[in-house]
Image: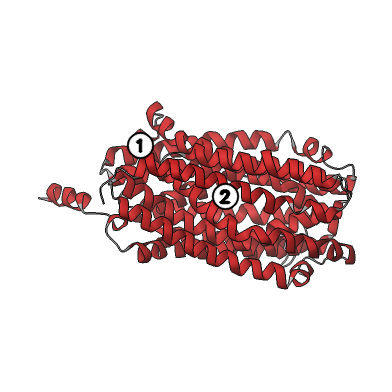
Amino acid sequence: MAQNTEVSTQLKENKMGVMPVGRLLIQMSLPMMISMLVQALYNIVDSIFVAQISEKALTAVSLAFPIQTLIIAVSTGTGVGINALLSKRLGQKNYEDVNKSAGNGIFLFIISFIVFIILGLTIPRTYFQSQTDDPEIVEYGVKYLTVILTVSPGCFMAILFERLLQSTGLTVLSMVSQLTGAIVNLIFDPIFIFGYLGFPAMDITGAAVATVLGQFVAALISITLNIKKNKEIKFGLRYIKPDKQVIADIYKVGVPSILLASIGSVMTYFFNLILGSFSMTAVTIFGVYFKLQSFIFMPIFGLNNGLVPIIAYNYGAEKKKRIMDTIFVGIKVSVGIMLVGLLMFELMPEQLLSLFNASDEMLRLGRPALRIIGTHFPVAAVCICLFSVFQALGQGVYSMIGSFIRQLIVLLPAAWLLSLTGNLTNVWWAFPIAEVSSLLTAFFFMKKAYGKYIKHLPD
């Protein structure tokens, strides 16, 4: 009788296949949007605290950003592959492969953070010296990045187990984990940086320590919630044993997603070099822009974290109408959020920059920068949604190609050519130029994906 009850429970349709799409997307995405919004707010506050040390400390954090992006690229990219495969197997009601997907994901994340620990012990000084000859910025950067890299396991494990919660629809629990980690970060940032409550003042190292502490707390909570609350995944050592086919299926989506995000890391590094030919203040403005835009983009990414498992599940269950409805609702909500971001960048750039203790020179150069870059936000909303669709359909390579075209084929060459005018303001126009190219690429691949993977499905 107990066995029959278990089978009946497993065969019961997951909410991703039956709940009205609008309500489902909100229910799955809103917790992640809120938690990622809090994380974005933390990133902003983190930089505000660092800016109180000095502008050079803020510049060092800006220069470290491409490596931090690389950590996130590997962890979230692998997570996307696990998420898409696991949600698809749930749609197919293949529960053994659901467990293998989760177990092999744990194995891949362990290998990944070992690699980054080794990098943390070897590359920080060389990395910063390749971008600046200012010894103070280099020292700030080495202190910060060494901690971020060598204590990266918390970041990897937090993201993995949060993705497992998301892939089975437990996004509220994922939000609990992310929010707790971000709040811990927020509380301990000033304590560790400035030496409050009896702690020694650790300067910029304190910002890094607060970051990794929050990541470990988030990891501990997400692991506990998976073990106690995630009834659709069974954890055990036998599932962690590497399975070539499962790993191949994860990386079929995951590698393009990793490369997709890593392209952003490469772009940021070389864009910093272009801006450095004008001044290090220009580099700092670029870093501040990334912190500010994360407040707009993170909710979109949270929305798409909810969109991916819904589309993947209904693709596995062969429900075309639900797939298309999810896409259209996701685009509408994303564009609406981005329009708010556009208004913020156009109407209050000086107030935004002033949050970071901006000098007069930083305000002078930063006002036109934010206004110009902000014009690409609504276009980016559509691109992000369509790239997430490709990942959900197991065609992350489409997203990778689109991002490659946008950031390496168009953005960097456009920025370099515009820099030859000798006018820093012109360089920022590379962003809207590149985003238009990204939109055209996204439309091309969406037409192809629809014809090949969606059109033939039953309504």
Q: What element carries label 2?
A: helix
- The part of the image, by quadrant, that contains residue 263 is top right
Above-or-below relation of 387 to 373: above
- Circle 2: residue type: Leu
Residue found 40% across the figure and 53% down from its top: 165
How packed is label 2: few (under 14 Cα within 10 Å), some, or many (20 or more)? some
Inspect the image, locate mark 1, and give the three-letter code of the amino acid beneath it: Lys
Residue 320 in percent (x, y) is at 31, 50
Taking the spot 48% from the left edge, 40% from the top edge, the residue there is 396
In this picture, residue 35 sits left or right of residue 281: left
**SS for callout 1:** helix
Q: Residues within 10 Å of mark 1 (few under 14, many from 20)?
A: many
Q: Is residue 315 left or right of residue 270?
A: left
Which residue lies at the image location 51% right of the left edge and 50% below the top edge? 158
Mark 1 against mark 2, which lies toward the viewer?
2
On the question of residue 109 being in view, the answer is no
Q: Point out which mark residue 100 bears.
A: 1
Q: Residue 439 carries which label?
A: 2
